[in-house]
Each structure stands twice: as structure tokens, then as C-alpha cells.
Image: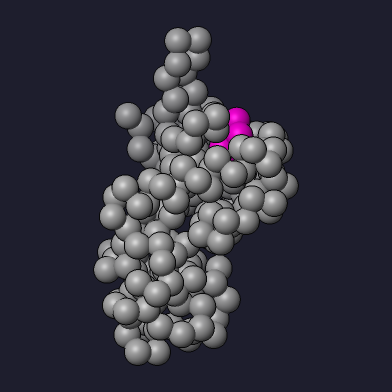
Amino acid sequence: MIYSLRGTLIYEMQGFVVVECGGVGYKCNTSRSTLRAMPKIGSEVTLFTYMSVREDAVELFGFATSQELECFKILTGVSGVGSKVGIAILSEFTPEQIAVCIASSDAKTLTKASGVGNKLAQRIILELKDKMKKLGVSTSVSDVSKTAAPHAAFGNIPAACEALAVLGYTSDDVMPILSQYDPGSKVEELIHKTLVEIGKR
């Protein structure tokens, strides 16, 4: 399994980039979000990758952040969500926005992504919430509040904790970090700061 690529960006087109490593050019299918984050052609770049192996094709997917990669893997684990739809969702939303949609059962927003109808959006929410419950991850605001630091039980911190649970993080993982931030901050901002902090560890 190729987890990441570090090399020179030699080609970029809608839907994919090519990164040259050791004289070999690797085509990486990717989202619009990652494409927007790419430097100019000829620059060094690092992509976090996922290799899809099927009977009829072997494809490499590349993402600018490890959070986007993990979100892609979680999404494509849902019945009916293939690589194409996973990329479409990540082209429309950030991992933080996707987590908020799932935590708040906002299927309507998810349907803005190409190829995602209402039934599929509902299935994504249902399966990912159920997945967290099976793993023993709390997605209840009241449960989060019981274990939170006093000021962390208010504002948007419980909602951010629920959304992070969708990405596989327990309240024990994130509450020590979230409790440092202003509860009045936007949910997406709290999620982003927490993911950045987790990435440093």
C-alpha cells in the first residue's frame, strides 16, 4: 500500500495530478479541494494516497491532507459510495463540513455533491452514525457534556465533538484539545483546529 507520495508536480488537470518520484510519474485522482491546494507545476508536493484495486482497474487517489484521505476512506466504506462519489463529496465539502452534516443529520446539504441523491445522503448519515455507535463512540451532546471541562460543555464544543466522532475520534481524544478553545467559535473552526492539533502529535 502506498500511503504517501513526495515528489515534483509535473501535470495537473481536472480530476487528477501527476507527481514524479524517482523518475516515475504517478497519476493521482483527486478532489477539487486538493487541486486548489496544489502549488505551481515544477514545485515539490506531498500527497497522502489511497490505492484502489479492482478486477478491472488499479487506481491511485491523492489528497493534500491526511484528514481528507481518512474522510475518503470512511465515505467509500458506505454501501453505494464508490471512489467517484467519494471524490465528488470531497470536491464539494471539507472533511469538517462533512462531519457536521453527518452529526446534524443534514442530508439535504450532502445532496449538493454530484451523484448524491437524497437516499444515498440518508444512507451515508445512517451508516456512519451507526458505525460510531458500534465502536462505542458517544454522539450525544448530553454525554459529551458530562465528561467535558466546565466551559467546554457550552457553546459549539459539544457539537464539534459529535462531528469529530463521525471521523472516528472519541470524546477522550478530542475534549482535552477542544476545551482549550472558545466555545463561541464556529463548529467548523473548532473541528479544523482540533484536527490540526491531532496531526501534530
Looking at the picture, the colour scheme in use is one colour
The quadrant the C terminus occupies is bottom left
Residue 142, picture quadrant: bottom left
Comparing 85 with 116, the one in front is 116
Residue drawn at x 40%, y 83% as measured from the top left: 153
The quadrant the N terminus occupies is top left
Q: Which secondary structure dominates the residues rendered in magenta?
A: helix
In the figure, is residue 145 to the left or right of 114? left
Residue located farthest toward the bottom when viewing the structure as drawn: 151
In the figure, is residue 101 to the left or right of 114? left
In the figure, is residue 81 to the left or right of 170? right
Residue 86: image x %, image y %? 56, 37
Residue drawn at x 35%, y 37% as measured from the top left: 3
Reply above or below: 156 against 168. Answer: below
Comparing 70 with 102, the one in front is 102
Residue drawn at x 49%, y 66% as measured from the top left: 192
Residue 47 is a magenta residue: no
Q: Which residues are magenta?
A: 84-88
Total marks shown come to 0
Residue 159: image x %, image y %? 49, 71
Residue 195: image x %, image y %? 42, 63
Residue drawn at x 38%, y 46% as measured from the top left: 131
Q: Is residue 148 visible?
A: yes
Q: Is residue 200 visible?
A: no
Residue 2: image x %, image y %? 35, 32
In the figure, is residue 62 to the left or right of 94? left
Residue 87 is a magenta residue: yes
